[in-house]
Amino acid sequence: MLMKFSHFIDLIALKVQANLRNEVSRYYLNYLWWVIEPTLTMVVFYVVFGIFMKRGTPFFVGFLLVGVTTWMWFARSIQNGAQSILQGKGLMLQVNIHKSFFPLVVIGRDAFKQIFVTSLLLVFLVFYPTPVTVCWLALPLLMFVQLILVAASATFCAAFVPFLPDLHFIIQTGVQLMFFASGIFYDIDAVIAPEHRAFVYLNPMAGLIKNYRNVLIYGQWPDWSYLGLVFLFSVAFFLLSIMIVTYLDYSYPKICQK
């Protein structure tokens, strides 16, 4: 059993490497697109909310960049992962492999790209007038918790899209709604009334983004209790998603042949 699991992980790693090489080979700028995409998005939001609407949030460029890069990892993995089983029908019809393989490859690919983007974000923040403190040591833990949340969400969505392909559009709408409720370009504590903040932070991305900013911009340790709750929820959600995919494993080839 352990050998089978190890072999499964090795296959995921090999597929992630192949997908990354294939992705960068399609563009002249190669790996630079991993930086350009979040940077262009940040510029748009900065112009709209930092200049036209004159948001008064301290360290606004860093505040916005942390929110955008964190959110784009989540949104990209959910939207790409949701269709991964359906798009993997060519391979699944040839090889008997657990169907969680497909969303996990997407998750691994996007996580690798996020490490690259986050490294550049840290370089930017070193030269930006934000404090570089010992609290930055909590960043790997924050990213690990988000990785589990991303894996759970993407796998859960991927489990059902093959049965109802139009569900992908509903997922996109849901991701957009979460975007506006996650405080990407505004401070939730400054905008949302105190009696409604607990409800807003039921969205785990809102709380994670706040903790990223506390660690990287404001020199504060994350809220350990909140982080622990998100971690436990994400692990339980991930295990549930794997169980659903396992239960439906033999149904996917039949569905994808239609």
Image: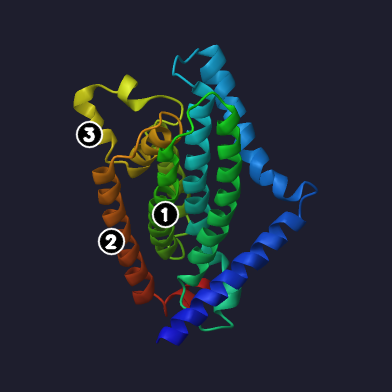
Which secondary structure lies at badge 3? helix
Q: Position of residue 10 (x, y in %)?
A: 55, 76
Give the labeled residue for mark 3.
Answer: 198
State left or right for residue 210 relative to residue 39.
Answer: left
Residue 236: numbered disc: 2
Check disc 2: other Cα within 10 Å, few if <14, some if 14-19, many if 20+.
Answer: some
Query: The residue under label 2 is which amino acid type?
Result: Ala
Q: Position of residue 63 (x, y in %)?
A: 48, 28
Name the residue rendered at 53%, 17% in the picture. 50
Q: Is residue 241 above or below residue 47?
A: below
Q: Position of residue 191 (x, y in %)?
A: 33, 20
Name the residue rendered at 49%, 33% in the picture. 132
Name the residue rendered at 24%, 45% in the picture. 225
Query: The residue under label 1 is which amino acid type?
Result: Phe
Check disc 3: other Cα within 10 Å, few if <14, some if 14-19, many if 20+.
Answer: few
Query: The residue under label 3 is which amino acid type?
Result: Ala
Check disc 1: other Cα within 10 Å, few if <14, some if 14-19, many if 20+.
Answer: few
Colouring: rainbow
Residue 144: numbered disc: 1
